[in-house]
Amino acid sequence: MNGSTNGQINGHRGHGIEVMVVGAGPSGLVLSLLLAQEGVKVVVLDAASALDAQPRATHYAAPAVDELRRAGVLDEILSLGFVPNGVAWRKLDGTLLAAMTPESVPEENRVVCLPLDKMSKIVYAHLEKEKSAEVKWGHKVMGIGQDEERAWVKVETKEGPRTLYADYIVGCDGGNSQIRRSLFGDMAFPGRTWNEQIVATNTYYDMSKFNWLDSNFIVDPEHWYMVAKIQTDGLLRITYGDIPGLSREEYIKRQPMKFKQILPGHPEPSEYRLTNISPYKVHQRCAEKLRVGRFLLAADAAHLCNPFGGLGLTGGLVDVGNLYDCLLGIHLGKASPEILDKYDQVRRQKYHEVIDVVSSQNLRLLLEDPDTSEKVAGFVDICRKANEDKELSRKMQLFSNDIKYDFTQHYGESSSITTEFHSEPKDGMKVSHRSVVL
């Protein structure tokens, strides 16, 4: 290993790298804001004409909260959002199986809730104030290229085709990422698609008379679902399973019947107000590489998981926080470009060993029969123990910290950086402190 001089690696003097971020979603915006606040020149490209107005994901676990705090936006997010008062698992009839409340968790590490559309508006408003950042709407990536000196994208705009250049280009352009497709091919996204059909809704329904916690998961082989408060005005995210193979129109037609079957109080349509409904399939997938030369992948462009447990959103924000540390180290001359290989290795390892395993366990738990399942019995038992043991409760509720990694420890390293990468574990239902849905 060659030593560094004045924090510089092998003559890398922090020449002021330029970064292009493809995708103005939450992860792309947070990465861009973090970099711009340190004076890194950032250009954000998005094919759309404005921010995505869909609420989508809502819950930020402790590692994501840390990144939002670093970006300087957490206080505003808290001012519009809230900290949920706990999570419960129940039978279909509402009988409580287990519950956890956040008292054992330090306030600064508690889950925060705010729909992504509102979070993105806050981050974007901050980004607009940064002189070194620029957002280009209506720029659709059509092709990519790179050489030893720079990388580029070919884009379509209203004014015609253009080619844009940067030192590094980060694909934060979602599950259908054009950057990932251009790197590996349209069909190359290793993993699996769940057979289960999910229908997500945003609904106003008065749950106060049932005295449930803010987040609730119903365990049932047929009528499994989640109901969680996602806004301070009482808006709920109700996400449930339905029979596979139907059209969007058929799922929408079945929704009133499903609500009457599954929700406490068995409401008629006149008793609630549906504001959004979205049937979709869920996936567990991870790209074969998160770095190819000067191109990098992060968040949903890099990996996907089911929504039960919030590890998709939290994992994506941890990705971009880690990538920020890597790129900033290169920008300042404190790290060699090989730190990006470490990013690739570590983030895939965290996906395969934590995110994929735990999110899969979370969903499979909901499909069990709560009256006969040994898996449910084991989970309920460990939750009961946690209610009597504050340290165990804290560990269970902060399990997502397992996906964190400090890349600044590699500042000053100039030789090829390697990390032990374990084979993908078998996804059993072994109960551990990670087996918790939050």
Image (spheres, rainbow, N blue to C red):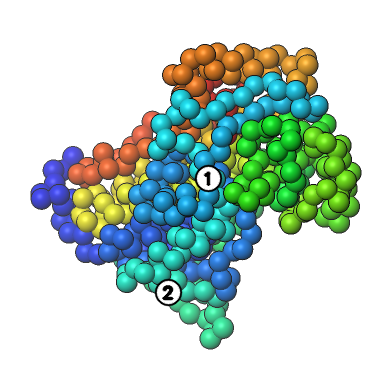
Instruction: Look at 40% across and 70% down and name the residue there.
Output: 128
Query: In which quadrant is the N terminus drawn?
Result: top left
Indicate whether 36 appears above or below 79.
below
SS class, disc 1? loop
Q: Which amino acid does the dot numbered 2 rest on?
A: Leu
Q: Is residue 298 visible?
A: no
Residue 152 appears left or right of 14 = right
Farthest residue in the left direction?
5
Horizontal and vertical percent position of residue 24: 50, 63
Q: Nearer the viewer, residue 26 or 16?
A: 26
Count of labels in the image: 2
Instruction: Look at 19% across and 44% down and name the residue there.
Output: 412
Horizontal and vertical percent position of residue 37: 31, 61
Real-space Cα separation, disc 2 to disc 1, in angstroms: 40 Å
Q: Which amino acid does the dot numbered 1 rest on?
A: Phe
SS class, disc 2? strand
Query: Residue 164, which numbered label?
Result: 2
Query: Residue 82, which numbered label?
Result: 1
Which is closer to the viewer, label 2 or label 1?
A: 1
Instruction: Look at 21% across and 64% down and name the residue there.
Output: 15
Q: Is residue 199 visible?
A: yes
Q: Nearer the viewer, residue 364 or 208?
A: 208
Q: Which of the two discs, 2 and 1, labels the residue nearer the N terminus? A: 1
Label 1 crowd (10 A; few <14 / some 14-19 / many >=20): some
Label 2 crowd (10 A; few <14 / some 14-19 / many >=20): some
- State which quadrant residue 427 falls in: top right
Query: Residue 174, which numbered label?
Result: none
